[in-house]
Amino acid sequence: MIGALRGVLEVFNGKGALKNLKYRTMHRDLQEILIDEDALQARIRELAAQISLDYKGRCITLVGVLKGCVPFLSDLLKRLSVETNVDFIMVTSYSGSKSTGVVRTILDLKQNIEKKDVLIVEDIVDSGLTMGYMLKNFSTRKPHSLAVCTLLDKPSCRKTKVPIKYKGFVIPAKFVVGYGLDYNELYRNLPYIGVLKKSVITETK
Ligand code: IMP
Ligand code: MG
């Protein structure tokens, strides 16, 4: 009896379309799920293991790029076995689904990163303009080391070369949301990465 009940619950909570009922108002705006929860978590575990190995015996200053980094940074952080120190920066170049190309700092780091091992944690590198701006800006502050960890990489949209040391997934040139990534501040709480339907994207810029 309990087993049967569990079976029913698993249908609702496990893999498959029914699971997405929970997020149905957001889920129906998606064209497809590109990376599901299990794949995200498995890859983050691999990234954390690699980073922990590379920074063994050191303390990493993780700089999260707000707001998109939040779920990724949180899951990555919990799996790192080295000492960490967390700070945040908020920059912007996006309005809706288009990059304006002009990057601005909205909130700067609280800490001095001189002589620190800095790892920038980002949700996605698209044109590369935001990351290029941050790398240039941070390198003037003389860190001991400076590297990039991004969950997603959209290389086909690159406008400037960016050295990415750790990347979760390479994705096609599609506008994605979920797991921190937004469209006009919505969809960040989806636990997976999905492609937004073209009909939902209203901008014509
Ligand atoms: P870039 O400067 O063009 O590389 O853009 C970097 C920032 O734009 C990322 O940190 C995201 O916040 C945002 N962005 C780029 N592509 C997407 C996307 O497909 N969905 C949501 N946000 C995106
Ligand atoms: Mg971002």
Image: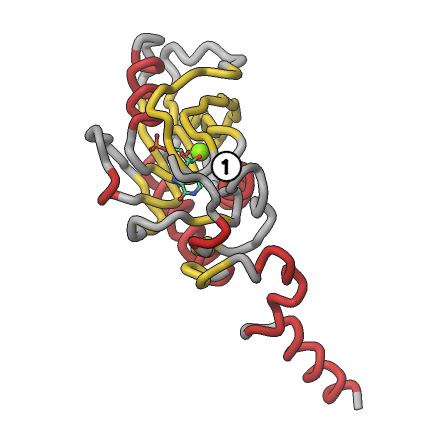
Q: Residue at x 38, y 52 (%)?
A: 46
Q: Is residue 29 above or below residue 153?
A: below
Quadrant of the rendered image containing residue 20: bottom right
Give the camera-side residue of 136 and 185: 185
Judge by depth and name the residue closer to the eye, 15 or 58.
15
Image quadrant containing the N terminus: bottom right
The image shows residue 180 at horizontal and vertical percentages of 53, 42
Q: Amino acid at mark 1?
A: Gly
- Compared with residue 176, is residue 133 higher up or lower down, i.e. above or below? above
Q: Position of residue 80 (x, y in %)?
A: 47, 41
Q: Residues within 10 Å of mark 1 (few under 14, many from 20)?
A: many
Q: Quadrant of the C terminus?
A: top left
Q: Residue at 43% of width from left, 30% of height from top? A: 94
Q: Residue at x 56, y 54 (%)?
A: 191
Q: How far from the left and from the top, in percent, is residue 139? A: 30, 14
Please give left or right for residue 36 compared with residue 103 in the image.
right
Extreme-left residue of the structure: 161
